[in-house]
Image (tube, rainbow, N blue to C red):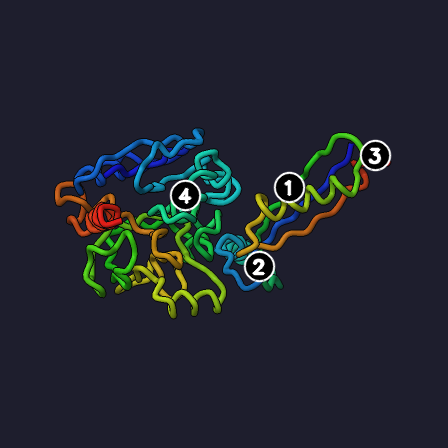
Amino acid sequence: MARVVVDVMLKPEILDPQGKAVHGALDRLGIPGIADVRQGKRFEIELEGALTDDRMSQVHSVAESLLSNPVIEDYTVHVDQSRTDR
Amino acid sequence: MRVGVVTFPGSLDDRDAARAVEIAGGEAVRLWHGDHDLRGVDAVVLPGGFSYGDYLRCGAIAKFAPVMTDLVDAAHGGLPVLGICNGFQILCETHLLPGALIRNDHRRFVCRDQRLRIESNRTAWTSAYGEGAEVTIVLKNGEGGYVADEQTLDRLEGDGRVVARYLERNPNGSLRDIAGIANERGNVVGLMPHPEHAVEALTGPGDDGLGFFASVLRSTLAA
């Protein structure tokens, strides 16, 4: 088994109203020193069998075609080593 | 003249769109998201609503529906396609149209009668309007903010592909007040406001929306 994590964030130049709402809530709670909040999505993908280069390139492919919209979002992929058989 | 209206799980406005087609004098043909079948229609409307619950991103899962494979091919071949609201989001997700639609800048759902200017009548869906016509059409969306990079926006403006623009007040933060755009050929149009809700005085702010459906009936007759 392997767990691969895909994080998706709006590109820096794209307005993030949800992040702004969270930022506003933090201000109302009186939490000091917060310059900005951006909200994103995290996908934890459990793969059967061994983690091969082919499987990783499949994950990149779905991250680009489905999990993110490259017009407005960036994604990163990393392996959760604690949940991945060696 | 047969105009298909696709129903996805979570579509809301498919019946109103079909009804608008009929009021304009066309025959509405119901299409199902799960079928690889456009039933020989002459044009297609992707209606508003919340396909697949807007999960992941608006339109992101609908773009992989079986009917969309056929529709994207047909649109590249010149089939007139109008995406309204969620349909516009789906057209952007499939890259038939550039850019994307994001959450309204003021974070609230907006529902109002919206003034628009028809900026281009050189599309399959706006030929019945006079260029620069000002109309009132229902607007209702939570994620209607149109965004694209500066070069894309400049190209859309330069090529006359901005189809409709918001007047008086920008309701959702759309860049350059853009309410609707077309592809290069003008057969594919995406529009955030809902012309299908403005086809008769009894149930809408008037019948200013009827021109979208009348246009495609005319353009498919001419083709």
Q: Is residue B201 left or right of residue A80?
A: left
Query: Is tag 3's residue or tag 2's residue first in the polypeptide sequence?
Result: 2
Choose mark 4 or mark 3, whichever is in front. Answer: 4
The residue labelled by disc 2 is A11
Does dot 4 land on a helix, a strand or a loop?
helix
Do we see residue B83 in this rendering?
A: no
| Closest to the observer, B182 or B50 | B182
Q: Which residue is denoted by mark 1 in the rendering?
A: A43
Q: Which residue is mark 3?
A: A85
Gap between marks 1 and 4 measured at Cα: 33 Å
How far across and how far down the image is residue B185, in percent? 37, 57
Say what amino acid the circle numbered 3 marks. Asp
- 10 Å crowding of disc 1: few (<14), some (14-19), many (20+): some
- Labels 4 and 3 positioned on one and the same chain: no
In this picture, residue A21 sits left or right of residue B31: right
Q: Residue B74 shows which numbered tag? A: 4
Residue B219 spot, x, y in % from top left: 25, 50
Residue type, mark 2 in image: Lys
Mark 4 and mark 2 on one chain: no
Mark 3 closeness class: few <14, some 14–19, many ≥20 residues within 10 Å = few
Tell me if residue B27 comes above or below residue A75 in the rendering.
above
User: How much space separates mark 3 and mark 1, taking CA atoms?
Assistant: 19 Å
Subunit of mark 4?
A: B
Q: Amino acid at mark 1?
A: Phe
Kindly check if marks 2 and 1 are in contact, taking CB atoms under 8 A apart as contact.
Answer: no
| Residue for point 75% across, 41% down | A54
Q: Give me the residue at 48% from left, 47% from top.
A: B94
In the rendered structure, which disc, 2 or 1, sits on the residue that comes first in sequence?
2
- Nearer the viewer's eye, disc 4 or disc 2? 4
Q: In the image, is residue B51 above or below residue B212?
A: above
| Residue shown at 74% from the left, 37% from the top | A3
